[in-house]
Amino acid sequence: MKVLFFPLAAAFLVATCGSRNANSAPAAQDGSASAPFVAPVTELAASLDAADPAEEAVAVLTWDKTVHDFGDVSTADGPLSCTFTLTNVGKEPIAIFEVVSSCGCTDVKWTREPVPAGGKATISATYKNEDGPTAFDKTLTVYVSGVKRPVVLRLRGVVHEKKKSLSELYGAQKLGAFGLKTRSYKTGTLKQGLSASETALVANLGKTPLSISFADVSAPLSLSVTPNPIPAGSTATLSYTVTAQKGVYGRNVYTATPVLNGKKADKPLEITAWTQENFAAWSDAERREAALPVFETSTANLGIIEKGSVVEAVFPCANRGGSALQFFKADPESPALTVTALPGVPSGQKESVRFSLDTSLLPKGENVIMVSLTTNSPLRPLVNLFVATELR
């Protein structure tokens, strides 16, 4: 599949530390090149819809990967280097204008000469590995001629003080010989009409090859393992993708149960995705007239109350936008908090979002519970509110 891009019309921007590309291609098991990166069809369609019909595509690019996972390394390994390769599969020459690293801990070099049709360019990055034992996830923001939006590349890994065995690294949540650091994974923010993909390293802790498949897979979820079978005593890349379901918003957990050499595991993997509205195709007029939620307070402080009581938390909200405000979903971080009123708010009007707090489900002492509201406002697609109380 080819990826179409449109002319770049804006000045260069600087990427912030920790930014993530939700539609990244899987990294290979050993950190080498994975399958060529292509944007999901739904994302491509959205970008085409959002573009000026008068513009013609001038750059057609592919990448060997957009994520390089160094996996588990040690401080003694010193600087960690990798290379990303861009291929110009269009008909016109292109050039890499600039590559911006998210921090000074990563050095970068790239092909400075124009890249002819059919030619390749490389971006070489070196993570200095001077921060001691820590997990890292660094970004490179790449600006290419003929590309409307910059491409974000990622370098990530986990640095340990000393080298660890495969069992030490992947034995915490193992399912038989299938070694896992966790059974719970996340994607980046998922937009309606699009897909969000991520990868994680897993391991075969056994002494024979391990074939992996999946059963009871939630409808929006797809998973794969590379290589498969996993050779004995080695790692592999678990790739997972969640595709947004129409009308489904907020935090949702999807599951899949590993099948190991034909035998179904007794526990599933869990993939969490946060789905928001997709505003990419909205016109400037629609954005100007969009809903705008303004809450009187972001924290409802209920004061000191007796444990075991059920109390109400109220958040008055005005809609300062030109169209009706809709709350798609409320996601409390604790089952003690449940939504009792999540009204739509007409333009210029005020309504109250209400929650019921069952304090019998909370420990004594101070408690602060966050609840996330997914909205139809492009300026505030996600609103975080807090309920605070002290139980005695």
Image (cartoon, grey):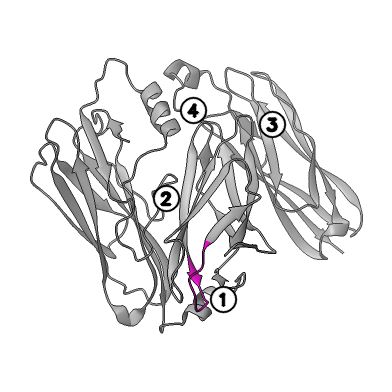
Q: Residue 35 got which mark?
A: none
Circle 2: element type:
loop
Quarter of the picture holding the N terminus: top left
Mark 2 to mark 1: distance in Å? 27 Å
Circle 3: element type:
strand
Amino acid type, residue under disc 1 in the picture: Gly
Q: Is residue 192 above or below residue 100?
A: above
Amino acid type, residue under disc 3 in the picture: Cys
Give the residue number, with chain letter if any, for mark 2: 20
Residue 371 in view here = yes
As rendered, which of 86 and 20 lies closer to the eye?
86
> What span is colored magenta in the figure?
202-211
Which image quarter: residue 343? top right
Q: Is residue 33 above or below residue 313?
A: below
Mark 1 to mark 4: distance in Å? 42 Å
Mark 1 to mark 3: distance in Å? 48 Å
Residue 262 x/y as whole percent: 60, 62
Q: Residue 279 got which mark?
A: 4
Mark 2 to mark 3: distance in Å? 31 Å
Give the residue number, with chain letter if any, for mark 3: 317
Give the residue number, with chain letter if any, for mark 1: 171
Mark 4 to mark 2: distance in Å? 19 Å
Q: Around disc 4, counting alpha carbons within 10 Å, would you say few (fewer than 14), some (14 to 19), or many (20 or more)?
A: some
Circle 1: element type:
loop
Quarter of the picture holding the C terminus: bottom right
Residue 14 x/y as whole percent: 30, 46
